[in-house]
Image (cartoon, rainbow, N blue to C red):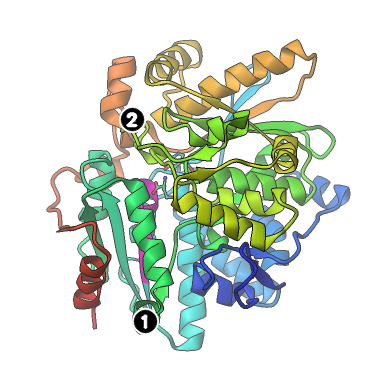
């Protein structure tokens, strides 16, 4: 399997090269040259298998001969061994036709663990085989950073630097990043928002002298391996509800578009997905775009679902690549226009996007009231991000009932409520406790650096702190 850039001007790479490379050298994002397809029987055969076996069957065609089957199975087993639920991603019924996919049973209590625990193992195996070391620099609005630090802490071949927006992540998220005392992990608080953090990471990838000097690698969803690992739970959940014999829809709390893009890949692989519903908070650039208003950046407004406080949605570029008929030049031009504010999506591309995606938005009040109403109706305590999803899913279900369709809707519950105790308690009156294994999180000393939102200052900081 070869990997190509969304902007069409970077060398084609193998899976392993794309995983270790991060951003393509033309500024684009890597994608498989062809999306593997699973037959009806292949998908039917997933019923009743363990999460790990489904993960192997879904991902193996993408990784080709990077690892032997035995090595890859072993990597997958180690990745999910530390999850706190035997099903890894349990599915719960909220009401008739409405389901919740709990993706927060990993070590840092967010869906990011599904991919990060896997790529921690993949990086370790690939780097030790090559005898190489890398410097991972990541941007986070809270969850990617904690998951990355957890997955890579203590590894000799990797130094990790995570940029997070100062004062804009929850206390639990911050502490998950600042309390690990391993010498190879570094939390950096940046003055700015998540979009600034992500822009600086991409700047570093586009600064080839720095990139090559530190052997830069990325674990944001820039990295295709991150997205790939997230494809798996679309299969396990859809099959649990009767796919491929029956269609399902998904509503996905969305910020950087990585998770829902994984759903798009699952659909292209043959999973019978009816709708992929993008659920945004008040930072609703994607909802506005899918409603036909173009893709124009506004300023990011802090919300009760801070991990989704994103305006420049990195993986939307991957969706645009397919919507524009795999035309790298067109994508390149759109991304140039985005740097000066935004762009209108062509009519053809809008039609292509709408074949798979629809969207909705939840205000702050709607998010909080959904936490309270879901608790009252079902006993499920949602995190604010998952609440954005459930609110938008309810609307989508009402609309589809009107159209007479009876396709079950699965909403992705992307984080544990205990990561956002203040908002959850405000909404429901219930203080969600952290799992007992994390009960000392508030007592442990923190270690972080404040760095200006300035490329040269960040690069200098990283070079000075790379553990020898
Ligand atoms: C808890 C939570 N929910 C939803 C999202 C949005 O996911 P994505 O950025 O893949 O759209 C994020 C951040 O990525 C998150 O941390
Ligand atoms: N919400 C994310 C933002 C980064 O997204 P990624 O999927 O590209 O890593 C976070 O929690 O950091």
Q: Are marks 1 and 2 in contact (CB under 8 Å)?
A: no
Labelled disc at residue 209: 1
Label disc, if present, on residue 153 of the rendered structure: none
Q: Is residue 379 above or below residue 123?
A: above
Under 8 Å from ligand 2: the CB of mark 1? no
Please name the residue shown 66% across and 70% down the image.
3
Q: Which residues are magenta?
A: 136-146
User: Which x, y percent locates residue 337?
Assistant: 52, 51
The residue tagged 2 is: 303
State left or right for residue 173 relative to residue 134: left
- Image coordinates of residue 377 in percent, x first then y, are 50, 11
Assign the C terminus to one quadrant of the image.
bottom left
Whether residue 53 sits left or right of residue 421 in the image: it is right
Please rate how many residues cluster around mark 1, counting C-alpha atoms within 10 Å: few if below 14, some from 14 to 19, many from 20.
few
Q: Is residue 139 magenta?
A: yes
Q: Is residue 14 visible?
A: yes
Q: Quadrant of the N terminus?
A: bottom right
Mark nearer the N terminus (1 vs 2): 1
Vertical relation: 250 (above or below) 456: above
- Disc 2 C-beta below 8 A from ligand 1: no
- Disc 1 versus disc 2: distance between alpha carbons? 37 Å
4 relative to 38, above or below? below
């Amino acid at each position: 399997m070869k990997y190509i850039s969304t902007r069409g001007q970077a060398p084609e790479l193998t899976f392993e090269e794309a995983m270790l490379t991060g951003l393509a050298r033309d500024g684009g994002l890597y994608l498989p040259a062809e999306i593997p397809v699973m037959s009806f029987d292949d998908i039917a055969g997933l019923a009743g298998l363990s999460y790990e076996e489904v993960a192997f069957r879904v991902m193996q065609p993408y990784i080709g001969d990077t690892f032997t089957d035995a090595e890859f199975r072993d990597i997958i087993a180690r990745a999910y061994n530390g999850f706190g639920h035997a099903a890894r991603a349990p599915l719960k019924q909220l009401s008739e036709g409405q389901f919740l996919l709990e993706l927060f049973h990993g070590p840092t209590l967010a869906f990011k663990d599904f991919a990060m625990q896997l790529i921690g193992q993949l990086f370790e195996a690939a780097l030790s085989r090559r005898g190489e070391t890398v410097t991972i620099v990541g941007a986070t609005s809270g969850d990617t950073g904690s998951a990355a630090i957890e997955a890579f802490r203590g590894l000799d071949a990797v130094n990790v630097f995570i940029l997070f927006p100062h004062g804009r992540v929850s206390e639990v998220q911050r502490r998950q990043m600042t309390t690990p005392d391993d010498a190879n992990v570094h939390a950096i608080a940046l003055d700015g928002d998540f979009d600034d953090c992500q822009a600086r990471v991409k700047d570093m990838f586009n600064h080839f002298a720095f990139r090559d000097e530190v052997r830069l690698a990325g674990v944001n969803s820039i990295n295709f391996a991150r997205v790939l690992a997230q494809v798996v739970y679309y299969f396990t959940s859809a099959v649990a509800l009767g796919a491929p014999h029956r269609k399902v829809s998904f509503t996905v709390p969305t910020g950087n578009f990585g998770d829902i893009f994984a759903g798009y890949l699952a659909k292209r692989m043959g999973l019978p997905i009816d709708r992929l519903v993008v659920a945004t908070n008040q930072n609703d650039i994607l909802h506005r775009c899918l409603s036909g208003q173009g893709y124009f950046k506004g300023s990011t407004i802090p919300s009760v679902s801070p991990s989704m406080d994103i305006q420049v949605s990195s993986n939307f570029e991957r969706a645009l690549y397919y919507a524009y008929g795999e035309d790298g030049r067109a994508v390149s031009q759109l991304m140039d226009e985005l740097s000066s504010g935004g762009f209108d999506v062509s009519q053809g591309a809008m039609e292509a996007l709408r074949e798979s995606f629809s969207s909705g938005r939840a205000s702050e009040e709607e998010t909080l009231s959904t936490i309270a109403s879901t608790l009252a109706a079902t006993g499920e305590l949602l995190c604010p991000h998952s609440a954005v999803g459930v609110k938008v899913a309810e609307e989508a279900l009402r609309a589809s009932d009107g159209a007479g369709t009876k396709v079950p809707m699965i909403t992705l519950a992307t984080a544990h409520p205990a990561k956002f105790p203040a908002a959850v308690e405000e909404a429901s009156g219930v203080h969600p406790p952290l799992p007992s294994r994390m009960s000392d999180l508030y007592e442990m000393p923190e270690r972080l650096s404040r760095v200006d939102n300035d490329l040269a200052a960040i690069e200098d900081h990283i070079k000075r702190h790379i553990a020898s």
